[in-house]
Image: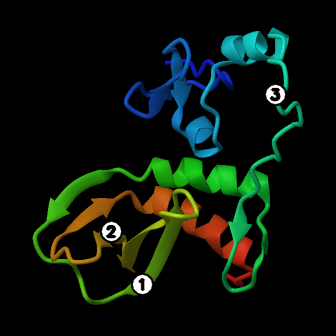
Amino acid sequence: MICRACGREERASEGYPCADCGTFICLICSFEGVTLCKACQEKQKGAAPAAGADQSTPPAEVWKQTKPEAKDADQAKVTDLLTDLSNLKADKFVEKASTTGEEFSITVTFGNTDSLQHETVKFRKSGNDVQATLGGESGAAIVSTADYDRAIAIVKDLAGIKK
């Protein structure tokens, strides 16, 4: 489907409906806080503000990096990272996760400041196999090595980790 906010073509299962009209908005736009399609955004811009309403422009959403140092993250690279991470799909599952190989963990914090949630995914690469596990799970998902390598290259670049 075509995202009605940015124009990207995405799978229908990887997006959300526009908050006003229900047309498709892709996952990346949703991650960036976009809730309205272009048409509904234009309608809202054209609508006269209610009397006494705050007419200031809300601040742009800025992705923050907290480790290894706190700073504003490169927004284009974060968008690329989110795209690559959203492409990591389980090719198959194994009952017991591997305990050998290079491990890389990604923790994402999301939600409102009064109810933050954390999700950590541990990736383990051994040879040409990459497994992804969630805390408390004994099994693992086998994911595409190429997609994993692309995502990890961006993570390392954002964090300043030399390859």
Quadrant position of residue 93? bottom left
Q: How is the image coloured?
A: rainbow
N-terminal-most mark, 2 or 1: 1
Which residue lies most toward the bottom here?
100
The three-letter amino acid code for the residue at tag 1 is Glu
In depth, the one of 79 and 107 nearer the eye is 107
Query: Label 2 neighbourhood size at 10 Å, few (<14), some (14-19), many (20+)?
Result: many
Query: Label 1 neighbourhood size at 10 Å, few (<14), some (14-19), many (20+)?
Result: some
Query: Label 3 neighbourhood size at 10 Å, few (<14), some (14-19), many (20+)?
Result: few
Up the image or down, 101 lies above or below 134; here it is below
Q: CA distance from mark 1 to mark 3?
A: 50 Å
The three-letter amino acid code for the residue at tag 2 is Ala
Left or right side of 114 for 103: left
Badge 1 element? strand
- What is the x, y in percent for residue 114? 53, 64
* Residue drawn at the location 75% of the way across and 80% of the way down: 70
N-terminal-most mark, 1 or 3: 3
In depth, the one of 69 and 7 nearer the eye is 69
- What is the x, y in percent for residue 43? 74, 10
Quadrant position of residue 74? bottom right
* Residue drawn at the location 57% of the way across and 47% of the way down: 83
Left or right side of 83 for 22: left
The three-letter amino acid code for the residue at tag 3 is Ala
Q: CA distance from mark 2 to mark 1?
A: 10 Å
Please name which of the two marks, 1 or 3, marks the residue nearer to the observer. Answer: 3
* Label of residue 103 in the image: 1
